[in-house]
Amino acid sequence: AAALEERIARAGQSAYLLDGDNLRYGLNGDLGFSPADRAENVRRIAHVARLFADSGTIAIVSMISPYDGDRRLARQIGQEGGTDFIEVFVDTPVEECERRDPKGLYARARRGDISGFTGIDAPYERPVNPELEVQTLGNPVEESVEKVVRLLEQREIVVDRRA
């Protein structure tokens, strides 16, 4: 997501990364990992993303959203505001997510410090029809970024303004 934000900025457009974990330390600091808290987390982030989109900034939302109903609500919030909502499913096995985890959240969940953690003791509902699916295991980050950028260009959301 950070590489995508950088790539869009290099094309001359405004983009901002809304990282689910970072938002939990501020705006969503009062939420845990229960299904109700996860739904509220997604709802709040969807409204923030919509505000960014209203300002002409591409909001890149990087978060684990394990429930289909929550993702449908996020899409609805965006569409009600007249903004594009593109679901990109980053298909990565939970073992790889644990290996890459820079914040140590999976280790904390394994120790029992965090309960209701997706992939450990809570389910994940795989997206049925995401606009794009990228496989990160064994593929360079740049390849995934370019797939997303191509989709954004096809939808005329990203237009290279450097020319």
Image: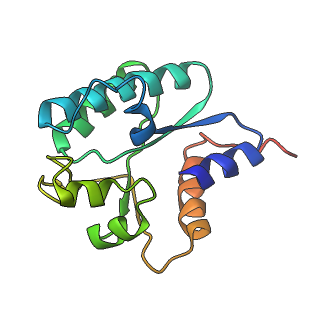
- Above or below: residue 56 compared with residue 149: above
Q: Residue at x 76, y 48 (%)?
A: 10
Q: Residue at x 26, y 39 (%)?
A: 71
- The answer to whether residue 16 shows anywhere in this view is yes
- The answer to whether residue 119 shows anywhere in this view is no
- Above or below: residue 73 compared with residue 106: above
Q: Residue at x 46, y 28 (%)?
A: 49
Quarter holding residue 34: top left
**Where is residue 31 shown, x and y percent of the image?**
25, 28
- Above or below: residue 135 compared with residue 1: below
Quarter holding residue 13: top right
Q: Residue at x 40, y 61 (%)?
A: 101
**Residue nearest the observer in this picture, 87 or 91:** 91
- Above or below: residue 148 compared with residue 49: below
Residue at the extreme right of the image, as rendered: 163
**Residue nearest the observer in this picture, 66 or 157:** 66
